[in-house]
Image (cartoon, coloured by chain):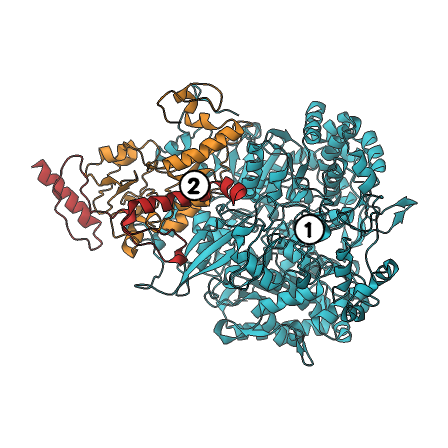
Amino acid sequence: MARMKFLCDAERCIECNGCVTACKNENEVPWGVNRRRVVTINDGVVGAEKSISVACMHCSDAPCMAVCPVDCFYKTEDGVVLHDKDLCIGCGYCFYACPFGAPQFPQAGAFGLRGKMDKCTFCAGGPEADRTEAEFKKYGRNRLAEGKLPACAEMCSTKALLGGDGDVIADIYRERVLRRGKGSEVWGWGTAYGPGKAGAQPPAGGKS
Amino acid sequence: MLLTRKASEQAVPQSRLARGLSGVLAKTMDRRAFLRRSGITLGAGAAAAQLPFSMIGEAQAQAKGAGKMEVKRTVCTHCSVGCAIDAVVENGVWIRQEPVFDSPLNLGAHCAKGASVREHGITHDSHRLKTPMKLEGGKWVKVSWDQAYTDIANKLTSIRKESGPDALMIIGSSKHNNEQSYLLCKWARLWGTNNTDHQARICHSTTVAGIANTWGYGAMTNSYNDEQNSKCLLFFGSNAAEAHPVSMLHTLHAKENGAKVIVADPRYTRTAAKADKFVRVRSGSDVAFLFGLLYHVFKNGWEDKKYIHDRVYGMDKVKAEVMAKYTPAEVEAITGVGEKEMYETAKMLSDNRPGFIIWAMGQTQHTNGNAIVRASAILMLALGNVGRPGGGANIYRGHDNVQGATDIGPNPDSLPGYYGIAPGSFAHWARVWNIDLDWLKKQYASDAMMTKPGITVSRWYDAIVEKNENIDQDHNLRAVLFWGHAPNSQSRGLDMLEAMKKLELMVVIDPYPSATAAMMAMAKKEGCYLLPAATQFECAGSVTASNRSIQWREKVIEPLFESRNDHMIMYQLAQKLGFADQLVGKRGDKHNIKLVKGKGGMDEPSMEDTLREVNAGTWTIGYTGQTPERLKAHMRNMHVFDVKSLRAKGGKDAETGYDLTGDYFGLPWPCFGTAAIKHPGSPNLYDTSRHVMDGGGNFRANFGVEKDGENLLAEDGSHSKGAEITTGYPEFDHVLLKKLGWWDELTEAERAEAEGKNWKTDLSGGIQRVAMKHGCHPFGNAKARAVVWNFPDGIPLHREPLYSPKPELVAKWPTHADQKVRWRLPVLFKSVQDKSIADKDYEKFPLILTSGRLVEYEGGGEETRSNPWLAELMQDNFVELNPKTAADRGVRHGEYVWVSTPSGAKIKVKALVTERVGADHVFIPFHFSGWWQGQDMLGYYPEGAAPIVRGEAVNTATTYGYDIVTMMQETKTTLCQVAKA
Amino acid sequence: MRRVALGAAVIAALFAVGCGEQAQVTVYKQGKYQGKPDTQAWNNASPAAELRGSAWNKGDRGSWETAINQRALGQNEDIRIYKQ
């Protein structure tokens, strides 16, 4: 099994924010904490507008994990990056390090003190007993332990946001790209594998 | 468009980083990021109430250990796509919400609203109306239900005695389920008035009137799903990406399979961002655009001549007018679209058939909305697109049940099933309702009032203040029930507030107080009651999606707080007012609608029995076959229905043994005949490629058999598959059946009932059964009308909006003459337009103001703006300004501006500078309320029941203007000026 | 000295965000997760049917992965449209 990944199909994303509220609903994320957001590029520019849903990318070599001074991050065997809020000191260093802005800090207190870092968990909860109230209160829902996938991906209005085993969702995406003939340039496949027609064979030994 | 990384562009969008680095405004900051930043202080308040320090999550009240868990299947209440939801309930608390991948309509997908419906079941920090309230001395005080009922009933009774039943208007709801809307329609008639209406008036009333008069029924011809079978989708007047997001799943899937998507709109909407072709059109120039396309179709001979010959009346007359009046130069002057673009669009439509034209409010909300929608229909008829899979008029309805409420709910000019308010219809329904027709007649002020269409919701407030001699009823309105409707979706807010000052009794029945409560508290010190109704998740019932499929909702939770279900309130008020027995059809030893125990052991009408009564009487549109049993079986077995055709290939319901084979999902109406004949429903209307018992059809014979010597019935050889009559034929009645020699095929019981009746009034269903047995359509086989001679403009005509920026076009294409009375009130057209020109409004208010939807909110918005998960996403009302418009006024992105209109109102909103709108248009979403011309109305709401996000209602400032046929308001096009605040 | 200060700082921070947590003595090992252990998803029993999840054999990673990958197909509308 490959790692758990997200992939947002920019050709399909209509910025409906279904993923955002699905996450809010499922994890009861409070106001001000945006585990997932939709980002729109060239908003309103004719012919150029594109939207992408962004949350934690669960990086293979996660910068947040690398910089955390108290080492509160860990990675599950599926590649989901999680952290222990009991250890988190709210320093915000992971926030500096993350290129996607995944770490969120709930506002609390009169002076806007930073609370514990909160971020997308791939709906895999955290280091409390699975599917308990304690885990839910701190980390949100553990859908993986229920045999489900993240709420955002499962509820996406146009099936733009895909989430699950990297191989499986890459297959879904690849079939779409082949059918419509475009879309993969957003994710740099043209840069990585060279310009060419959709459906061109990858370099020998390379994964498609 | 390929997105390649340019050296000057950032790979990572600015908005996220800018949020962390204060003060840096990215060049392409998107609307949501920009607005979210302003909500920090707002959020702190909400957050403080919700959270334990620094942790997330306010976990639901969950019992320790395993509680009793159940799953209830329901349907989202926010739009007409009808996304199914599995609600997980534990010990009566709604704890989880899961997607239903099996649903053939939405395949598990949701938009922001659908993904957040569980919030309706959260009692902590809820902004719902929790108890009945009364306005006393300008303050909201809690009262008991009994006290409220007594006060209201006493006041209504005395008003009735003094001024007659027409002094009350019952404004009902498109968010009621079918059974509730049906009961409310009945309730109004039992009270004795036709003054009842609902959101369809301000939504698709022009569509229903225009399209029904074109070819038979005024509903979506196909379905969202059927777009997958289409080659071309023209969105003209629809922003589906924000208004019907999940429908885009079907649209984009179709696009990826090669369908062309064209979006014509004044704005570059999020739907346009997914289009193959975007055409910018001036708001209000719709007929010219559509006929401009038709010009090229005719000029190049692209029309489907055989189709027109067989199935359309009057196209030659339309062609003559189109070629004469809507030349490319003229069209460019009106719409702003050049000849080349019009030609290319027309060519794309013609080269890619079958195709759809798709519209929503963009086409309907104009003074000539009835003409615009007909022009759309004519365009599709000319291309031969109507009545086949993959083609037609895909009309996107708005609310979750606006289709059902339009079909069988509270309408001022019809009884359930579009039976007009004529003596014959009342006789029919009195039979079905099991009430005494004479008693019903006496409830009305007079026979004349009984058959006169009532006041429309778009003008309810005019009926309060208009001079009595100008109103077509004895007394002005003195009382209004605002039942599941918002006030900020009607135009002319200033006038509405003035009228509220003169209203004697306002009763708001809603899960939320709604802006009505706040406006009444601003207007008066007493005379307003608020009754907390429960949402559609707190009761069961059926709901009709835009594609006419009917889904059954299970009750998720009991009504929260002190709220009661709408049908319980209807019954209880009817008890106080003396027609409770009639409401449930209890007379003699027959009792149509049994009473079941609802909340607190109180009686309420059974939803299943109500649907059965609907089945018994609604023969016109085929609501007869959709029994509760069949619908529930469909909901339990969604996985057997094919997505592209909506058909069940097989399957047997485990619970009841019902065989689903051949059924179309939700038995989309018309599902003719009784459930016994197992008609499968009609997924695509007028589809001649199928047998009528297979869901096929043809255009309806509703307009006579001939006109001026021309045949109105279908030509020889044009008929639905397998029809034994291969020519056109009129509607079926007992006379026709006898003439054909089919009368003896009726059973004895059917013959007894059907004698002297037609297919609409025969309660046995025998006429329909026998006609369909021979492959014939009960409603006849006729041509569609391109010329609707009973409308003011038989052939659609471009008419400038009342408030137009172009005086030279107003001179050439003026609006209608003033009307002395329509729907009981005088309506002005020409005098308003002339005054606007004389006052030089086009100079003082040089920008075209158009309004529309956002994906985060729905309708008037009080419900969705009370949901923190949605409210956080859109915290301020705004006006979209083109960079030139903003620069000319010295307005910066994010600053407050005043938007003023010729109505005299001005509203304060934030400026969103974007290229989405052209330099001559501005856009304001209509979902906001709670501010009044710059002032927060928070103090006027009952405590704890104001929405989290409040803002100016664009309709405070919108101007006078009504469609001549239906009184639809002209909210899509008016004029405004913008100035720095 | 620094380690003690760091540990103390961590403890102090933990106290500050108290919430009744038990103080933990953290021995700082660079680059190694210092927090509570977590259970892998497949080491749970399948949830009740009402929760609408999947079913697998507890402890059997392969059966959980199969169930999850089957579930992921719900995000591929082609399956529901063409194959179901």
SS at mark 2 in the image: helix
* Residue contact at pointers 1 and 2, CB within 8 angstroms: no
- Of marks 1 and 2, the one in the foreground: 1
How far across and down, in percent of the image, does residue B56 sit?
32, 50
**Horizontal side, residue A148 vs residue B641: left or right:** left
Coordinates of residue A78 in the picture (x, y in percent): 30, 40
The chain coloured orange is A
* Of pointers 1 and 2, the one earlier in the residue sequence: 2
Q: Amino acid at mark 2?
A: Arg
Q: Position of residue B542 (x, y in %)?
A: 58, 60
At x 37%, y 46%, the residue is C67
Chain letter for the cyan colouring in the rendering: B
| Chain letter, red in picture | C
Measured from the top left, where is residue B924 in percent x and y? Answer: 57, 41
Outermost residue toward the left? C1
Q: Chain of mark 2?
A: B
Residue sticking out furthest to the right: B709
Chain letter behind tag 1: B
Q: Please give the label number shown on residue B36.
A: 2
Q: Is residue B580 visible?
A: yes
User: In the picture provided, is B94 more to the left or to the right than B509?
Assistant: left
Q: Splitting the image into 4 quarters, where does residue B283 fall?
A: top right
Q: CA distance from mark 1 to mark 2?
A: 48 Å
Q: Which residue is labeled 1 in the image?
A: B695
Q: Amino acid at mark 1?
A: Gly
Q: Secondary structure at mark 1?
A: loop
Q: Which residue is farthest bottom?
A: B588
